[in-house]
Amino acid sequence: MGLLLYRIRPSSAKKRNMVLLIRDRTGRWLAICAAAVALAFACQIACAVRAQVVDIFDVNVEASAGKDGEDAKRPFRLAAQSTENTEALADFNRHMKRGTWERAFKSLEKVQGSKPDALVPRADGFYIPSRTYLRQLLAALPQDGKDAYRLFYDPEAKKLLEEAKGKNELASLTKLVNEYFITTVGDVAADRLGDLEFERGDVEQAAERWQSILQYRPESVLKRAQLLVKSAIALARAGRWDEVRRAARELRERHAGETAIVGGRKVNALSYVSGLSPADPSAKISSGSNSASGSAAEMSLPASSEPLWQFKILSQANAQALASMGNDWGWGRIPAADAVPPTAVDEDRVYANFLGFLFALDVKTGKLLWRNAKFHDIVQQLRNNQLLLPEQYGLCLVGDRLYTVGRESGKVSQQGAPFLLNCHEKSTGKQIWSSQKISSLKPWRMWGAPTASGDRVYITAIKNQQQRDLHLLAISAADGKLLWATPCGTYQVDESQLYNQRSSQPTLAIDGDRLFVDTHVGAVVLLDAKTGATRWGLNYEAEAPNTQYWYNSPRPLLTVGGPLVENDVLYVKGMRSTRLVAVQLAGPTLLFKRPVGGPAMLIGVDSDRLYLGGDEIEAVDLKTQKLLWATKVPIATPWTRAIMTKNRLFQFTPRGIFEIDKASGDVVARHRGGDLDSLGGVLLHSKQTLVTVSNLSITAYALQGSGAAAGGGQGSGAEKKAASTDTSTGATPAGATPTGAAGP
Amino acid sequence: MSTRIEASMALPIALASVVLAVAALALPCAVRAAERAVTVSAIGEVKTRPTNVEIAILASGSAELSSDALVKYRTSVRRTLDAFSKLKIENLRIDQGDLTVGGPIRNNNNGEYIVQTVAEPGGEAAVHTPVNISRRLRLRLSGIQTLKEDQLIDTIVRLVDIAKDSGNTIVGDGSQAMVTFSADQADALRDKASQAAFAQARARAAKYAELAGARLGDVLSVEEIATEMSETSVVWSNPYGMQMPGGYYSTSASGKLVSSSLGEIPMRVTLRVRFAMNPASPDEKK
């Protein structure tokens, strides 16, 4: 403005006056500018402390725009909130910094009125539901902000508390806690709501209520020891033992000797909570068939290389035909040639899902017990379909049920045929239900490995015509009906069109009522296993699949493992990521993120170390995140899955099974076995039998000390001969070969 | 001034004229001398049994974090050396090559694994480019001529197994072959082959001279010609680290013969020798 004023060149007699006027005006302008600058500076200083307090919740439009720009490049975008909400939060931030609280809270009302599950990006990279975000945002307000909030909203909150009686009790308390948690009665309401939910059996939700008081209302008059005991009981009911132990630790450190009321009795809080934890809590994580194994019982490798039995999935000729099929198309080796079928084992049988052909073998004899169709001409069928997507087949064994994912039998050759979820009786293979025949599941194409817990089956899926949008489905195990579907986010690339490399297969892990989804393309999401509500999401660095394919261009080694949960920490290593991510679930907060090799996959985690597999077996110290050791192992297929025991790691390689000492990383033994033509693959452990599953065969070995009829190994002539499949009775199953021919 | 110059130039001009005149007179003599020479080529071949088996392994550690790469590299080398030492094979020696620190290991499509030592272009990709620390380990089993073939094969298979189980890459020692066989004292063999070639050349030249009615004179020149020995993939590694024609490589190791197959390794030397032919004496003419 000043410059513009100086450009005025009056030529008349008014010139002098004008100049004076200009000077006068200029002086005024300068004064105004100086005052504005001083005011802004003062405001900056005044707000500096507040800004520090709420730094984690800092949202501004410019930053959001930047993040949106980044998000557009991400291979997977989480289901985030609308731009309106982002702007409303930015408004809140601005008003809060100025201390104009009424305007600030007014702008929050917009967010409160929106979809509660819409995710809001937090400054630390987590995406959390707007409702949780608001609670955390308000809890982090400076004291004058909290006072202002209470001034505005206490009357409404107190009114709701008075109304919380009889039929209205749950609804009123829920509204109060969700919308007015930081009012003076918010903590009392949350405590009462927790009691109600606990009585209704919603232990996870109840625990969250009590924990929110502990976390966000430190000034509450409610006794902390009592709240810790209550939440510990709820967490124990949910099987979240890591958090129970953490509650006990807090009681020991801060509230030793304090009492709490449990069931009308006064008890020592610490003793009570300490008594809740089992002596040796077993691993609770259940995972899909394609994730890494957790800790198994200690075992020693078979003494003999001679298998108990071997079932050839593919004949040598078919295996060669499959391997060269891609060459015929000019692609090089296709993923299906390296694929190891999803399998599971129990004490009686081995179950397999070979490109939709299901079969079960007797674990003792290798005898084929049932199958859903013949597959002797499988390679001929595969020739007609270049979009085989072998990684999208899945299998999950829970109780007496077998949940499988695959294309409809006979449609393996049909390009674009949807992937279905089927439920079978494990003893007979009889189909109990199929997603194809259930109206609520018909629009869905299954996309990932299933996992089951209680009366539910969980699986990720995409919709017909919306193949980039990933959802998590909860399905009734009894009848296959859809219980809920929660959007997880959107793929940048339509992965159902990837033919030259492995598409991303989301994997799941359940810990109590917490359900983790690793998309394997740069995002992990935590959902409530009961309601499907999203608790948070987190992006991590990953590459989008390269859709530009050159003839015979090398394929990256893409392994899939995890996610894993131990000591209330989530570990994630996506298949297209070179980062190992650890998330402290309480919070959540990012514990660490460290570079690892691209082909690395999660094997398992114990109290102080995390183990990675792939082309190198590695141990990472959880405290320092330092690499302790790395052992190279031969690898020929990315479809590998190791076994972790208390002291050992076992990996099935194309050169046999490697036994690795967890402490030093030294290879303590190698078992060549009887499947050395294969590329290696998956290890399964069943009581006294070790089962290897490769791209060619399923092979069983008697473990040492099992007393099973192990074969006469090299140099062990006194040992019994292999108990091959029952050839004498003519009951040799199709594809099974006597073991004698299979040894090295 | 000009007179003085002319006077001073007179002497050199005169000398040059004399030289030219002498040269002109000598030329016919030289032509006549060239006519009295014979040039022959001859190949001398000496065969020998290999005395060593050699396997080259690339022990490496690669990671985005240099400290990780170092842990991987150290454990890789230690485990590889431990594994071979546990075999307790006599005459097995492991030579450690030079340490290389660089980018990712790539196959140069010529059977060789090379470490990319040139830094990647800048930006985020450069930050995430793995650091690779590697060292070539050369296994050398000597004295194999004393082993029976079965024994030798057993030993080789054990070495290859250990190398493969170590997860390291068998890189070949500059060739596509996983295992190479070499013979020591190649310099001496070369001398022998040269002698044989020369003797052969002389004998042949003497015959030509006789046919020409002349007598074989002194050696005027000797030229060694590179010999292709593709049928056995033999590699001559000279002590000077020189690249030999024919696409073969050479190393700085002192002369050795290398073959990708177990069998006699030929050493060939081809010479082109030029002998003078002197007039035969009357007696010889008779």
Image: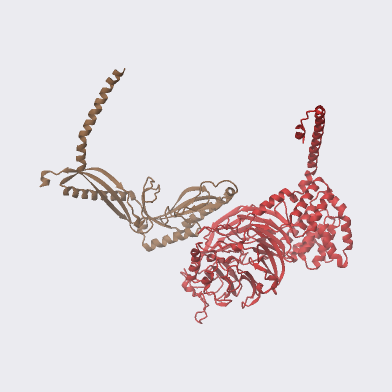
* Quadrant hosting residue A622: bottom right
A574 or A565, which is in the foreground?
Answer: A574
How many marks can you see? 0
> Residue reaching furthest bottom?
A729
A738 versus B236 height, above or below: below
Dividing the image into 4 quarters, which one contains the N terminus of chain A? top right
A367 or B146, which is in the foreground?
Answer: A367
Residue at image x 20%, y 43%?
B35
A379 versus A218 height, above or below: below
Q: Is residue A556 visible?
A: yes
Colour that chain B carries in the picture: brown
- Residue A279: x %, y % from top left: 70, 65
A661 versus B135 height, above or below: below
- Residue A216: x %, y % from top left: 79, 55
- Residue A343: x %, y % from top left: 59, 70
Position of residue B101 in the picture relative to residue A182 (left or right): left
Give the chain letter for red. Answer: A
A532 or A1, which is in the foreground?
Answer: A1
- Residue A716: x %, y % from top left: 47, 71
* Quadrant hosting residue B4: top left
